[in-house]
Every structure is written in C-alpha cells, then in structure tokens.
C-alpha cells in the first residue's frame, strides 16, 4: 500500500468547528505515533506505527473513495478499530483515553471562555492597584506593557492548564478554593519552581546563555557580572526564584585572582620607577604570586627577591599594601554593580527583574570575608539615589563557632549584618544550628550548610539519593496549598455544637491525597520535557546531575532530586474555627496546632517513602493567596469573627499580626513549626521605631530566634525614604531630613520585607 496514495485526492476533512481542510495523511501518522509513544515499558518501533497507519489509509480509500468529505471523528474511529484488530490493546487504551480527555477538555475550555474574556478585560482596563492579578509578584510591574502582556499570557495559560493539562477534579478543587495550585500558568510548559545555583561548578569551564560562550571569570568584577547573568538566564527556564547558596565561597576565588593581578601590576610599576625590574627577575616573582593561596600572607615569603636591597624590601611591602587596598575597593565596586544589576536587569521577555536570593556568612577565608564585608557595605549604601535594594534578598547564615559568638572569626560580619538589616531590612537570617538544619551539616563542606530561597523555600533532605543531601543544584519542582481554615470551619465549633476532630482529619487526609496526586500529575508533565526545553537549567548543568545529558535525554532521573511540596495557610483561623482560640492565645490551641501540622508532615513523609520522591511540607509563602481563600470562604460562610472577618488569612503557622504579644512568646510558639515544615518556613518579627539606633536590641532578637530553633527568620521595621532629600529612616507625617509633609510632592517610599514573594502565585 502506498502511504501517499491519498495525498493528491480532493477528500476534505471536516474539523470539529465545521472548517474543512485538505486531507493530510501525515497528521494521521503523527496521531498514531503519539498513541504508541504514550505506552510506557514497551518495545514498539516505527514498523508498528506504519502497520496501523497503512491499514487506516487502506480503509479510508475503500470506504470514502466516492465521498468528498470525512469527519475527524471518523478518522479517529478507524484508528481505534485498527489498533484493536491488529492486537495493540494497550495502545488503544491510551489513544481512547487521550481522545476522551481532549473531548472533555474542549467542553470545559469552551465553558470558561466568558470568564477568560472578563479576566482579560480587567487586565486591560484596570491598574495594578485595582486588579490583584497584576500584583502577584514583587518583581513584575503589572502596569507596564510587557507586564500586562505577561499577565495576558498567564491568564490564558491557566485556563488552558485547567481544561487540557489536569484532571477536572484538580481544576474544580482549585476553582472552589479548597486548594491553590501555584504558578498554574507555567504548568503546561513543565517548568520547575526554583533552583539553588552552584556557581563554582558553573564557572569552572564557563557557560553559554545561548548567544555565545562565557569563559571562566578571572577577576571579581567578572565573577559578580557572570553571577547576575547566571541568575537572569536560569530564571528564564523556571517559574520561581533563583538562589545562590554560598555566595561568599563562590566569589572568594575572584577576589584572589583580582589581588594577584593588582599585586603583579603595582609591584612592576614600583620596580620600574626605581629601575630595578631586571635586577629582581620579575618573571620569577610572577610565578610565585600565581602560587599564592590567599590575599593575606607574610611578605617575607618574597625575601628571596629583595634580601640584598632594603629599598626593594620597602617596595615589596608597599606594593602589597596598595594591591590589597585596591582589591578591597574593586571588590566593593563589584558588589555594588551586582546589586545594581539585579535590580535593573530583566528576564522573561523583559517583564520581570529576576527574583534573586543569596546566602552567605560562613566562609572564614580573607577573600570570603572581603566579599561579605563589601557586599554588606554596598547594601547599606543603597541604590543610585539611596533607595533600599529589593534584590537580591540576602540571607546571613548563622553558625556557632563561625560567626555567632564573640571571638568567632566572622562575629564582626554577623554584627555588620545586623547593622545593615536594621537599616535596609536585609539580610534575613538562616540558622544552621537548628536541629533540623544541623543534622545535614558536615564541617568543611559548605554544600551541606542550609540555605533558603528568599521566599522561604528549603531543599536539603533527599530520599531519592541520601548521598546527595546537599543544597547546590537542587530546588522545588512545584507546590500546591491547602485551604486549612475551610476544613476547620466545616468541622469546628463555629458552625457546629462541638468540634469534630475525626471528621477534620479525615477530610484533611483526603485533600492531601488529592494534592499528592495532582503534584504527581504535574511531575509527569515536567518529566515529559527534554533537555532542550530548559537550555540553561539543564543544558548548562545547573540542576544536579544534568551536566552532559543529551538533548533528547529523559530528565526524570535528575528532576526527582527536587521536592514536590504541599503547603498550608491560616493555621490561626483554623484553630479559631475548631476550638475558638488560636495558638498564640491558648496552650490547648498550640497543642492542637502542632498535632495538625504533625499530621500533615507525617503524610508527606509517607508519600516520600511510598513513591521514592521528595515530598515535603511548606509553610506557604503566598501573601496574595491568603486573600483569595478568605474571599471565597466569606461568600460561602459569611463573616465569622476571628476567621473570615478580615481580608486575609494569617500566613502559614504565624501568630496573627493583630494579636498583641511579646517577641519571646511569638517565637516560642512558632519555633516548633519550623521543624515540621521541611519544605520551607519563616518567622517575622515586627518592630516599631528606628531600630538602626538600637543595634543591641536588634541583635538580641536574632539571638532569641536562634534559641527557639527558628530555621529562617526576618525582622520587619519601618524603612522609609524621602526621594526628594534622600533621607532614609523612620518618616512620619514630616520628613526629618527636609521638613516636608507626607503629601507635599512625591510620596514617601515605604518598603516591607514580608511583601516579597518569588513564587506561589
């Protein structure tokens, strides 16, 4: 049978929308091939596909030779008939199932068109302050042309994902507010959420962004420039943020390379002025400089070159001091440029600045210390007009014996971090000594030091490969959050005469099972992609174990090192619904709160064991989500005091911000939840007044966090700036810098740490 037999006929194919197109046998072959490819664990070849294809063509020629038209459904019927007749029962099952899902999806998508057009109308006609969809991410300006275009694409993609890429029960649970599937607009693309980038590995041989290869950097300016480019490039392959887990260690070699250049040049210039370059045999000096392991050393190591000349000895010592000082200044400039780049460079078609985070604090080498010192100084100085830099979100890693106590090598940097955070909100603080972080820590291996995404995501444990319980090269795959307060309302005393905890846990368990299945479905979509779909993340080996994989390689084996995460929101309101009090105001409520989150953690651990995948529990970071759930629940249950009577549910396990309590009590209550939420967590402390003038108190708060086993903590306080005079600090109705009033001219700029979310839309 000639496969092209029907190619020149006048037979028309009637599509589902009534349009008529010329018959194209190749499309039939493609459809059959997809059916065979969807059948896993079989050894089918192109011969099997061709056998079915030719039989279908033969029947079309026989049955429709006198017809002018054939419907698309009739062609599909013939495919199914011949799959059955030829003994391909497994392929038939996959083909029929896919066909049925597509038909159902078309109906669903059609029913959503009105809602879709209303959403697009709102995006077109309303400003970000009026339309919440335009305010989903801190790094997207929803009022700009490109920002609006991004939201258009996002809106359409979400509806497509619901209709075509997920089971209807998942879409229904999301739309009804039982769950929230985060970053659903990226689900069809199969992107992962975030990654902790190993810059040392990336810089080793250089890397490509797709427009040319960038060689290994050779000075600190190039190190920070390439670090920013790596963050920008990787963000284009993911829907979440980018974190650098050991910024100090990664940048330190750049400082040493810079010093060597400066020392050689300054020394040569001095010796040339004195006319003794030849006498010193400078070529041998250069060789010795290249062998230096640190920027700090005893200059007498070079005595062999100046032992016969006091003048030469003086020159060597002077050159060393000048080279060291120049390296220090260049390092500051590099850090300043890095911060400026990450607050101005764009990714994702120019619609976003990269959501970036850096972790540092434990490198005790002179080079690492110089990096941290100058980064903190550059952060303190602010941007070009003194603005507080939003990115990168910096996280200081606190470790006893390294920087926490007086006498520790980096204690001065810990104090400097407190000073800068008191002025600029950042750094936040990660605590390596908290038991659930310390269990992974191996001395002299910074890859095992806990690091966080700025939004709170944490990835370290690895049931897939326990030998690779490290931070670099890993990240979250996707996460979905559960509306915990609604389950509390349904089974609590607020609606019933008594609390039904058995019913509560039964429904919570069922909902977690549903979310688990949804995450697995999304994981399958991600694993169906190829290396070329993520040219930087996988193509350049950023993700763990992906280096060297071919373009058509299967990626499940490397992606499974990431995490599949279940989140929750509104524990406080859940407890109020169940027993009338939240965990901040009642020991009984605290006991129940810990039982609930322990129940959830136990379930995720069971999923990990069952599926050999890294399921984890996260204290959800989405600020906007808390309002979405509340609005839906309020429409169902009305205004319930202490539960739906505000515009938001309390973030994750936090003690409500409106509840008046002490810092110590808040952290004592929240501390135990950090251990349970292995997918990520954060505790905020809200301070009033200008804390920059009370650094002792600021440091004390950090120490209280440490003592209460907080994994990741941040301190919020007023950070205001007058763009007219540049004054930065607490500004009330009148600016202390120039005396102008709040609404006289340009508004006062006010920044708050907790408003930043890199993912979880």
Image (spheres, helix red, strand yellow):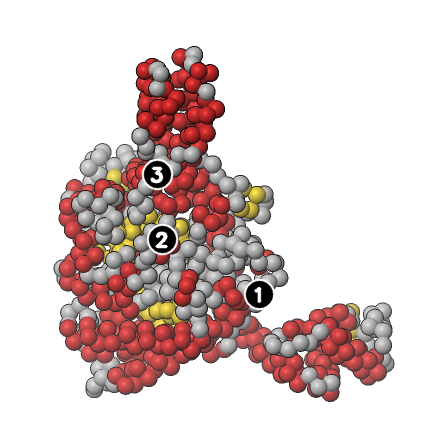
Q: Nearer the viewer, mark 2 or mark 1?
A: 2
Who comes first in sequence, dot 2 or dot 3? 3
Q: Residue 458 versus residue 345: which sits nearer the camera?
A: 458
Distance from disc 2 to disc 3, alpha carbons, whole Å, reads 17 Å
Which residue in the protein does label 3 denote? 367
Distance from disc 2 to disc 1, alpha carbons, whole Å, reads 30 Å
Dot 2 alpha-carbon crowd within 10 angstroms: few under 14, some 14 to 19, many 20 or more: few
Q: Nearer the viewer, mark 2 or mark 3?
A: 2
Which residue in the protein does label 2 denote? 445
Q: Quadrant location of the C terminus?
A: bottom left
Which residue in the protein does label 1 denote? 554
Q: Above or below — where is 703 with respect to 337?
A: below
The residue that appears at 15% across and 69% down in the rendered structure is 585
Who comes first in sequence, dot 2 or dot 1? 2
Query: Dot 2: what SS?
Result: loop
The residue that appears at 83% across and 70% down in the rendered structure is 4
Q: Residue 584 versus residue 233: which sits nearer the camera?
A: 233
Residue 500 visible in the current orientation = yes
The residue that appears at 80% across and 82% down in the rendered structure is 59
Query: Dot 3: what SS?
Result: helix
Distance from disc 3 to disc 1, alpha carbons, whole Å, reads 40 Å
Percent of width and height locating residue 359: 34, 50
Q: Residue 194 versus residue 292: which sits nearer the camera?
A: 292
| Side (left or right) of 379 relative to 531 | left
């Amino acid at each position: 049978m000639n496969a092209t037999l029907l190619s020149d006929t006048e037979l028309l194919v009637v599509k589902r929308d009534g349009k008529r197109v010329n018959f194209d046998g190749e499309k039939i072959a493609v459809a059959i091939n997809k059916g065979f490819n969807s059948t896993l664990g079989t050894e089918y070849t192109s011969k099997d596909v061709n056998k079915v294809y030719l039989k279908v063509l033969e029947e079309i020629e026989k049955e429709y030779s006198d017809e002018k038209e054939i419907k698309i459904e009739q062609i599909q019927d013939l495919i199914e008939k011949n799959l059955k007749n030829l003994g391909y029962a497994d392929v038939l099952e996959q083909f029929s199932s896919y066909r049925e899902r597509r038909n159902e999806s078309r109906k669903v998508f059609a029913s959503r068109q009105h809602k879709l057009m209303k959403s697009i109308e709102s995006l077109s006609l309303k400003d970000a302050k009026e339309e919440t969809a335009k305010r989903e991410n801190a790094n997207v300006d929803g009022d700009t042309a490109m920002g609006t275009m991004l939201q258009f694409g996002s809106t359409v993609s979400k509806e497509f994902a619901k209709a075509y890429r997920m089971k209807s029960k998942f879409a229904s649970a999301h739309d009804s507010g039982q769950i929230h599937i985060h970053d659903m607009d990226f689900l069809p693309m199969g992107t992962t959420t975030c990654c902790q980038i190993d810059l040392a590995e990336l810089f080793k041989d250089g890397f490509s962004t797709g427009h040319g290869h960038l060689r290994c950097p050779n000075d600190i300016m190039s190190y920070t420039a390439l670090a920013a480019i790596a963050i920008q490039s990787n963000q284009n392959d993911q829907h979440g943020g980018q974190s650098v887990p050991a910024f100090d260690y990664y940048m330190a070699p750049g400082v040493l390379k810079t010093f060597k250049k400066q020392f050689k040049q300054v020394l040569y210039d001095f010796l040339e002025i004195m006319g003794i370059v030849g006498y010193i045999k400078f070529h041998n000096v250069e060789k010795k400089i290249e062998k230096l392991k640190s920027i700090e050393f005893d200059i007498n190591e070079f005595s062999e070159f100046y032992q016969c000349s006091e003048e030469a000895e003086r020159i060597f010592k002077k050159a060393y001091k000048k080279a060291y000082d120049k390296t220090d200044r260049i390092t500051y400039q590099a850090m300043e440029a890095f911060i400026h780049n990450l607050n101005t460079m764009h990714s994702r078609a120019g619609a976003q600045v990269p959501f970036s985070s850096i972790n540092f604090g434990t490198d005790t080498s002179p080079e690492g210390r110089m990096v941290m010192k100058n980064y903190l100084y550059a952060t303190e100085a602010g941007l070009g007009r003194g603005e507080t830099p939003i990115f990168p979100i910096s996280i200081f890693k606190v470790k006893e014996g390294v920087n926490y106590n007086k006498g520790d090598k980096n204690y001065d940097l810990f104090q400097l971090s407190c000073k800068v955070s008191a002025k600029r909100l950042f750094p936040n603080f990660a605590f390596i000594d908290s038991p659930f972080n310390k269990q992974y820590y191996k001395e002299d291996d910074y890859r095992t030091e806990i690091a966080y995404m700025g939004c709170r995501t944490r990835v370290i444990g690895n049931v897939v490969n326990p030998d690779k319980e490290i931070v670099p090269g890993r990240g979250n795959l996707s996460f979905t959050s559960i509306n915990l307060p609604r389950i509390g309302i349904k089974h609590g005393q607020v609606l019933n005469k008594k609390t039904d905890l058995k019913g509560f846990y039964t429904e919570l368990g069922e909902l977690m099972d549903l979310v688990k299945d949804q995450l697995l479905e999304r994981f399958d979509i991600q694993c169906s992609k190829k290396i070329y779909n993520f040219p930087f993340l996988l193509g350049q080996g950023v993700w763990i174990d992906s280096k060297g994989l071919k373009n058509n390689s299967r990626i499940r084996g490397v992606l499974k090192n990431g995490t599949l995460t279940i989140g929750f929101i509104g524990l406080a309101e859940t407890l109020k619904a169940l027993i009338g009090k939240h965990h901040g105001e009642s020991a009984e409520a605290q006991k129940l709160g810990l039982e609930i989150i322990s129940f959830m953690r136990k379930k995720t651990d069971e999923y990990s064991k069952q599926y050999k995948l890294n399921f984890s529990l996260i204290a959800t970071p989405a600020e906007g989500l808390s309002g979405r759930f509340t609005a839906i629940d309020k429409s169902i249950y009305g205004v319930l005091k202490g539960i739906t009577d505000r515009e938001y549910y309390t973030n994750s396990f936090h003690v409500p911000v409106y509840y008046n309590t002490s810092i110590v009590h808040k952290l004592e209550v929240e501390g135990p939840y950090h251990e349970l939420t292995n997918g990520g967590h954060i505790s905020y402390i809200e301070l009033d007044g200008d804390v920059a003038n009370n650094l002792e108190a600021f440091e004390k708060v950090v120490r209280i966090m440490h003592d209460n086993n907080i994994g990741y903590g941040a301190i919020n306080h007023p950070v205001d700036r007058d763009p007219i005079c540049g004054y930065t600090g607490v500004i009330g109705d009148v600016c202390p810098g120039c005396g102008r009033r709040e609404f006289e001219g340009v508004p006062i700029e006010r920044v708050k740490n907790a408003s930043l979310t890199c993912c979880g839309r």
